[in-house]
Image: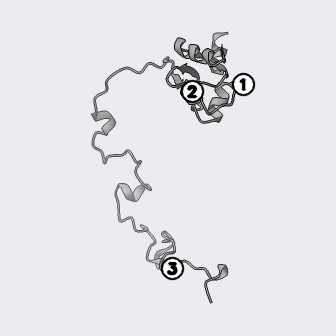
Amino acid sequence: MGTTLETLQPPAGARRRRKRVGRGIGSRRGKTSTRGQKGQMARNNSMPAWFEGGQLPIWQRVPKRGFINIHRVEVHGINVGRLEGAYKAGEEVTPESLHEKGLVPKKATIIKLLATGELTTALTIRVHRISASARAKVEAAGGKVELTPVHKPAEAEASEG
């Protein structure tokens, strides 16, 4: 007779009991609980992952270069060729629908339509920015383009008031 669901077992030696330490002198693992006498690892559980034993950490050793602009504007470009086949004729292309179809990431705050590829489907496109050649391709296919304003994050709007 074959193996049934109620007779399934893990192979021998696959599951071992957890080592219980610090449970008294009679357990052989009491008192110092396998940690030795003194020292760093006797006193706390473990070192942080970035700890390098007291030597100068790598983030301090490497030279710092360049400048990161915290006010940068990240524009996510999408080509008109990606819209062909993803939308049916007459459908509306919005930043939300582009995200739902997996064409842009959720963090894309400004979406710009670019002209690489061909478009034959008439679409109503609502994006934040568009190149002149992409606008020409959309209108040549019988579609419309409407630019939508960029929504600022809530904290930026509150600080301007």
Give the residue displayed 27% in from the left and 34% down from the top.
61
The secondary element bearing badge 1 is classed as: loop
- Along the viewing direction, whichever of 66 and 130 lies nearer the viewer: 130
Spatial CA distance of label 2 from label 1 is 24 Å
Q: Amino acid at mark 2?
A: Ala
Quadrant into which the N terminus falls: bottom right
Mark 3 and 1 residues: CB-CB less than 8 Å, in contact? no
From this viewpoint, which residue is outermost toward the bottom?
Answer: 1
For the view shown, which residue lies furthest in the top direction?
A: 161
* Mark 3, other Cα within 10 Å: few <14 / some 14–19 / many ≥20: few
Image side of residue 154 versus residue 72, left or right: right
- Residue 94 point in image, percent of width and height: 67, 24
Instruction: Give the mark, 3 or 1, whose residue is nearer the N terminus.
Output: 3
Q: Is 134 placed above or below 33 here?
A: above
**Nearest to the observer: residue 159 or residue 35:** 159
Q: Residues within 10 Å of mark 2 (few under 14, many from 20)?
A: few
Closer to us: mark 2 or mark 1? 1
Tell me which residue sits at (40%, 48%) in the image.
Answer: 49
Residue designated by label 2: 108
Q: Determine which quarter of the picture holds residue 161.
A: top right
Which percent across, then down, holds residue 91? 71, 26
Hey, what amino acid is under mark 3? Pro
Q: Which residue is mark 1?
A: 90
Q: Is residue 148 visible?
A: no
Amino acid type, callout 1: Gly
Which one is earlier in the sequence, the residue at label 2 or at label 3?
3
- The reply to whether discs 2 and 1 touch (Cβ–Cβ < 8 Å) is no
The disc label shown at residue 11, or none: 3
Most extreme residue toward the right is 90
Is residue 38 visible in this depiction of the protein? yes
Q: Nearer the viewer, mark 2 or mark 3?
A: 2
